[in-house]
Amino acid sequence: IAFNQERAVHRFELRQPGGGLTRWLTFVKEGVWHIWIGFDHILFLVALLLPAVLKPEANRWTGVDRFRDAVINVMKTVTAFTIAHSVTLSLSVLGIVRLPTRFVESAIAASVALAALNNFWPQLHRRGWLVALGFGLIHGFGFANVLIGLGLTRSSLALALVGFNVGVALGQFVLLLVFIPVAFEIRQSWFYRTITLQVGSALVVLTAIVWMAERI
């Protein structure tokens, strides 16, 4: 079965040899692969995570004191995002709630822009996990479009949902293993606080606006 996602064509063979474990691992692999090729999902997470190694001080950004603080900030954001997209992914795949694809994809692009804009106002930093929770609901519908496009049978829905969610979580975890140590080491530098955070967030906003215009 072939489907288009972010203009990348990916092929998925539904008939996998072996038992339930083999099929489940296939769905896990699909989840990992989707988060890695889903550039809008990655940019959304990046926009939310860039200030995770910083803290607001006198209405400006400064580096957090401890590595533990950075990890806690990251885990709050990623956990909120994971819970939110898991809920709407399940509701959509099970046919309980469905939204038009054009609306979902446009809303995902808008969420990327808004998440990046949030980085220009340090006083909103502590509410980053709420942004992840709210917009994560929209991203869940985007993930659901992938599974729905596979034409899964009712008997394989539970297997697919669990496997795909685990795969997305694993894909995010790999990204975090790379991001957190590097960002923490350079958090106090002018390059990180100005170029990486401010200029990087501005570029994310512009990219998301282009995506939104294309999708609308």
Image (cartoon, rainbow, N blue to C red):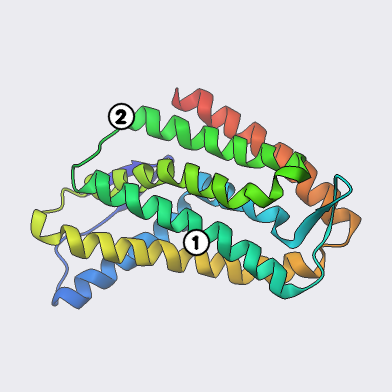
Which residue occupies the foreground of this view, 130 or 85?
A: 130
Quadrant of the rendering where the C terminus is positioned:
top left
**138 in relation to 84, above or below:** above
Q: Residue at x 48, y 43 (%)?
A: 134
**192 in relation to 25, above or below:** above
Q: Which mark is residue 35?
A: none
Image position, residue 88 (x, y; %): 33, 47
Q: Is residue 198 left or right of residue 103?
A: right
Which residue occupies the foreground of this view, 135 or 155?
A: 135
Disc 2: which residue: 100
Secondary element at image label 1: helix
Q: Residue at x 37, y 43 (%)?
A: 142
Disc 1: which residue: 79
Image position, residue 80 (x, y; %): 49, 56
Asked if residue 147 shows in the view, the reply is yes
Image position, residue 108 (x, y; %): 47, 37
Q: Is residue 2 left or right of residue 9?
A: left
Secondary element at image label 2: loop
